[in-house]
Image (cartoon, rainbow, N blue to C red):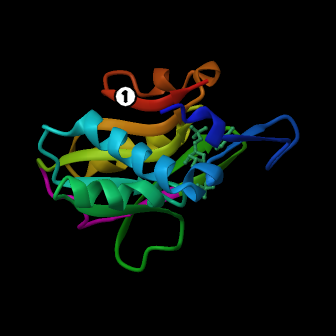
Amino acid sequence: MDFKPFIRDVNDFPKTGVIFKDITPLLNDNNALKAACQILFEKVHGQHIDKVVGVDSRGFIFAPLLASKLNAGFVPVRKKGKLPYETLSESYALEYGTDSLEIHADAIKKGEKVLVHDDVLATGGTAEAVCKLVERLGGEIVQCNFLIQLDFLNGAEKLNGYDIKTLLKY
Ligand SMILES: O=P(O)(O)OC[C@H]1O[C@H](OP(=O)(O)OP(=O)(O)O)[C@H](O)[C@@H]1O
Ligand SMILES: Nc1ncnc2[nH]cnc12
């Protein structure tokens, strides 16, 4: 299936100069949604996964679906101040800003096998911070998977050493 017709470019969002990859047309289409989820699943299927970590907020769309298909738990990584229990925190920079991400201190046990999922890999700042949080808890990252990779922003360089899988590259 060709997914590119389901990704909409929005110029100058959320800041001037950014071409925003809007995934809502893909989510809106029953067949594209199902097919995208199935392909992301097939890229990791066969490997043991204990936890799927999804990144606030667009990473929350596919991560729980993948967790369910992989018989794994789901772990939310959230922007600062949103998780209620004890947290670990990492600051990061992304294509259009800076922020902090947090994970619950008890969300991953030492040695657990982890799939990190997000919708977009752009500069890689977000995913790098997520990987640090997972590893600070002792999790072993099996794969980082994304719907979209913006190759021209070189995010993969920040994830050197990790297995990166992506549905669509630009
Ligand atoms: O590779 P990077 O340059 O770090 O950018 C990628 C991140 O940017 C977007 O999240 P955003 O912070 O816009 O939050 P949202 O999912 O709530 O829209 C996207 O969902 C990734 O998490
Ligand atoms: N250009 C972009 N489109 C959608 N999400 C993003 N996250 C970071 N950069 C992005």
Q: Does the magenta stretch include residue 105?
A: yes
Tell me: residue 73, above or below residue 99: below
Task: Give left or right: position of 11 versus 55.
Answer: right
Within 8 Å: ligand 1 and the Cβ of disc 1?
Answer: no
Task: Locate the C terminus and report the quarter of the image it occupies.
Answer: top right
Q: Give the range drawn in magenta.
A: 101-110
Left or right: 132 with respect to 50? right
Q: In which quarter of the image is residue 143?
A: top left
Q: Which amino acid does label 1 sit on?
A: Ile
Residue 104 to residue 160: above or below:
below
Crowding at dot 1, Cα within 10 Å, few <14 / some 14-19 / many 20+, comes out as: some
Whether the magenta-drawn stretch holds residue 49 is answered as no
Q: Where is residue 105 in the image (x, y as percent from the top left)?
A: 29, 65
Residue 156 lies, in percent from the top left, at: 47, 24
The residue sitting at 17% across, 48% down in the picture is: 49
Image position, residue 18 (x, y; %): 79, 37
Q: Residue at x 24, y 37 (%)?
A: 44
The image shows residue 12, relative to residue 1, as above or below, that is: below
